[in-house]
Image (tube, rainbow, N blue to C red):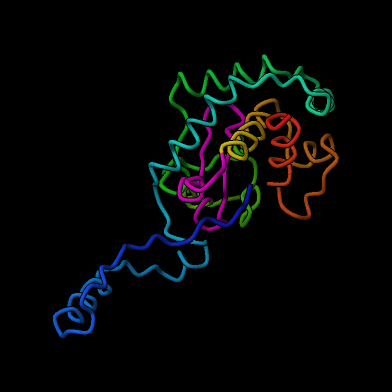
Amino acid sequence: MIEHAGTCPTIRIQRENETSQAGLRRLRSARAALPIPTREEEEHGGFLGYNQKGMDVAKGALKGILNLKFDSGPCQADFAALSKAADKTIDANAIDAWANEILNSGTLYDGDTSNTTWSVANFGGTQKYGSSPPPSWTVGAEFVTNNVLALSQATGSAIWVKSGAWQSFAADYAQGTLIHEIIHKFGVNDGQMAGALVVSLAAGSEVMSRKLRDDCVRQ
């Protein structure tokens, strides 16, 4: 679920009449107003926190999933293998049901700003603390500390996304990522999903999102 976020935002600086003293003063003032990212923000690919455009991309992707047919040969093969791994039926109807539930219940959230307490029952182990996170550990802490891209609640409909990164996502990749997260709701972990999709986790779990994008969204 880890992917580097986009580049830091900038403001447009008007450079008119820079050669004059007044122009230089205006330029220096504008530069001084630029927000300076912290070391942590630079390490995680940009400014942290809530981004409305990224949330809109994620919500649009959920709506887009409802228009997918999931009827290509590769997608059907993926669903058959995933159903076997889950010992549950994973098909177009099951994916659509979850997408509808998330949209109707309003359980799509920004990860960086979430104060939801981390629960191993809900989310599994953390990257830093494994199955024994401190009581104060939150979804937001996990996102910010490990640059998590998306997270699915195993025991409910909630999905969290790193909205700052999602603002630059193509619609098809966003859909593939959300299909990936929805599949976790059937009890399939990343290792099982990678095995079913015949991909390696060496390049990160986003490889499964790309596989689902290619097989089920672009087909």
**Residue at the image point whose x is 86% and y is 40% from the top:** 198
Picture layout, residue 77 above or below residue 138: above
Please check the rendered image and state whether residue 71 is part of the magenta-colored stretch, yes or no. no
**Bounds of the magenta segment:** 143-170
Q: Quadrant of residue 76?
A: top right
**Residue 202 in view of the camera:** yes
Q: With 15 as the anchor, is 118 left or right in this view?
A: right
Q: With 197 as the anchor, is 51 left or right in this view?
A: left
Picture layout, residue 57 above or below residue 12: above
Please check the rendered image and state whether residue 145 is part of the magenta-colored stretch, yes or no. yes
Q: Nearer the viewer, residue 168 or 199?
A: 168
**Residue at the image point whose x is 76% and y is 32% from the top:** 215
Query: Percent x, y for residue 218?
Result: 70, 32
Quarter of the rendering occupied by the C terminus: top right
Q: Nearer the viewer, residue 73 or 100?
A: 73
Query: Percent x, y for residue 196?
Result: 83, 34
**Residue 139 in view of the camera:** no
Query: Percent x, y for residue 20?
Result: 17, 84
Q: Quadrant of residue 178?
A: top right
**Residue at the image point whose x is 57% and y is 47% from the top:** 149
Of all residues, the one furthest to the left in this rendering is 22
Q: Nearer the viewer, residue 72 or 58?
A: 72
Picture layout, residue 159 above or below residue 131: above
Query: Percent x, y for residue 1?
Result: 63, 46
Q: How many marks?
A: 0
**Residue at the image point whose x is 53% and y is 51% from the top:** 142
Q: With 18 as the anchor, is 65 left or right in this view?
A: right
